[in-house]
């Protein structure tokens, strides 16, 4: 038997770290589940902010769930770039269907800075009547008790920002189902472990609840306008300003649509390159969330260590089950999980290279500090 090389030992150490991380994610999930949500007692008025751009798959059904809230006082604000946006017709239809719900539509025009979503949010925040605001993407669905649940959490006086964990709901395409598998098993795990080890000091995801005064205290959306991961820095700046930031007890539904391979890869690379610049150390640490690819590398280096591969898969499946089934209440196609792990590993490596991303068929360059800028003449289809 040949001696174990330094590479073999390094891979073994990395795999051991990944297995420890998997067990930590199980413990972190159990701790999250052990916290009892606050009693539903709040009646504070809420402003819901909905930036729109085109027709997402299931847009009307998504938006309708926000009109059907079992809550006494709330308003919904929508924002589009131009009146000809096809989402306008759906908003008008829903306003007629729910005439008692205060709903307004803002036409913002072209954004003067890279992050168009932030520009829309800034316009809606200025028009919002209430201090408690919900910023939610167009591909989100909620149950009628959503506003009751999240507003109750804000009875804590020091709380400034809350991130809602999400359950990814795939579209019909194979690539969408693969991505949903990864989102429902990996993404929330990192947040849960961070919550357990150091508390939540950032915000992520397609639905964030915040105090208007907390956003104003960090400089408003003007301070976030050049960041690609504006959600992350929003929570980071709020925590640095002394406001509480939490992971909400309410799990939303994130309908990710039926992207084809090209758009799916573009989305993954955008996320990877943005994360690498927003959280450089955290991005490197993502390697420990990948026990299966690491086990394959270990077995490639030392074939006689093959028992580590089924052991790693077993631990990976156990952690994925606890997070997806118990925390998110998501259904997983377990046959896709190993393949998704390998794709995720490949995208993670690719994230170390290049600085350009594609977002809504426009190309941007991500800068070293997480800000980004448009590449001129970049109405790309790539």
Image (tube, helix red, strand yellow):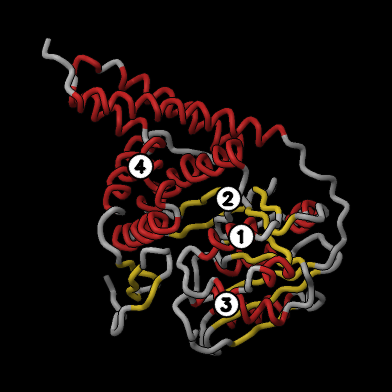
Crowding at dot 1, Cα within 10 Å, few <14 / some 14-19 / many 20+, comes out as: many
Look at mark 1 in the image and give the residue it sits on.
207
Viewer-side label of 1, 3: 3
Estimate the x, y position of residue 268 in percent, counting from the top left.
Answer: 36, 56
Q: Position of residue 187 (x, y in %)?
A: 48, 45
Asked if residue 297 can be seen in this view, the reply is: yes
Q: Secondary structure at mark 1?
A: strand
* Mark 4 to mark 1 CA distance (whole Å): 25 Å
Tell which circle, 1 or 2, labels the residue nearer the N-terminal end: 2
Q: Which of the marked residues, 4 or 1, is nearer the chain's N terminus?
A: 1
Quadrant of image for the N terminus? top left
Seen at 69% across and 57% down, the residue is 242
Residue placed under numbered mark 3 in the picture: 222
Q: CA distance from mark 2 to mark 4?
A: 18 Å
Q: Is 158 on the left or on the right of 309, as rendered? A: right
Mark 2 / mark 4, whichever is N-terminal: 2
Quarter of the image with the C terminus is bottom left
Crowd around label 2: few <14 · some 14–19 · many ≥20 (10 Å): many
CA separation, marks 4 and 3?
A: 37 Å
Hey, which residue is sitting farthest front in the picture? 241
Q: Are marks 1 and 2 in contact (CB under 8 Å)?
A: yes
SS of the residue under disc 2 = strand
The mark that comes first in sequence, 1 or 3, is: 1
Q: Is residue 81 left or right of residue 378?
A: right
Indicate which disc, 2 or 3, sits on the residue closer to the N terminus.
2
Which numbered circle lies on residue 340?
A: 4
Mark 4: few/some/many CA within 10 Å (<14, 14-19, 20+): some
Q: Which residue is mark 2?
A: 166
Query: Badge 3 local density, few (<14 within 10 Å), some, or many (20+)?
Result: few
């Amino acid at each position: 038997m040949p001696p174990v090389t330094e590479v073999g030992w390094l891979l073994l150490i990395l795999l051991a770290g990944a297995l420890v991380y998997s067990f930590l994610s199980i413990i972190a999930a159990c701790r999250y589940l052990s916290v009892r949500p606050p009693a539903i007692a709040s009646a504070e008025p809420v402003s819901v902010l909905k930036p729109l751009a085109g027709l997402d798959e299931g847009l009307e059904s998504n938006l309708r769930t926000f009109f059907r809230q079992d809550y006494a006082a709330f308003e919904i604000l929508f924002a589009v770039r131009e009146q000809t946006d096809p989402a306008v017709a759906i908003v008008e239809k829903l306003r007629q269907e729910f005439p008692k719900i205060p709903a307004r539509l803002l036409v913002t025009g072209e954004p003067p800075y890279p992050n168009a979503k932030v520009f829309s949010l800034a316009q809606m925040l200025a028009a919002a009547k209430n201090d408690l605001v919900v910023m939610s993407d167009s591909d989100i669905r909620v149950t009628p008790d959503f506003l009751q649940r999240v507003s109750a959490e804000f009875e804590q006086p020091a709380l400034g920002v809350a991130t809602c964990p999400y359950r990814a709901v795939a579209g019909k395409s194979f690539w969408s189902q693969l991505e949903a598998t990864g989102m429902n098993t990996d993404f929330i795990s990192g947040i849960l472990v961070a919550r357990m080890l150091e508390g939540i000091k950032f915000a992520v995801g397609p639905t964030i609840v915040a105090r208007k005064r907390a956003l104003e205290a960090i400089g408003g959306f003007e301070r976030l306008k050049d960041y690609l991961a504006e959600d992350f820095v929003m929570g980071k700046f709020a925590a640095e300003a002394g406001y509480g930031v939490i992971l909400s007890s309410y799990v939303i539904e994130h309908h990710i649509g039926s992207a084809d391979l090209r758009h799916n890869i573009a989305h993954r690379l955008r996320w990877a390159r943005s994360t690498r610049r927003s959280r450089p150390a955290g991005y490197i640490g993502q390697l420990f969330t990948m026990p299966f690819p690491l086990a394959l590398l270990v077995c490639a280096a030392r074939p006689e260590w093959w028992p580590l591969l089924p052991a790693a898969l077993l631990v990976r499946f156990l952690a994925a089950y606890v997070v997806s089934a118990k925390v998110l209440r998501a259904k997983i196609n377990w046959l896709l999980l190993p393949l998704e792990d390998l794709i995720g590993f490949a995208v993670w490596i690719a994230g170390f290279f290049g600085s350009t991303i594609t977002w809504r068929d426009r190309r941007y360059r991500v800068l070293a500090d997480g800000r980004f800028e448009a590449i001129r003449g970049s109405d790309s289809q790539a």
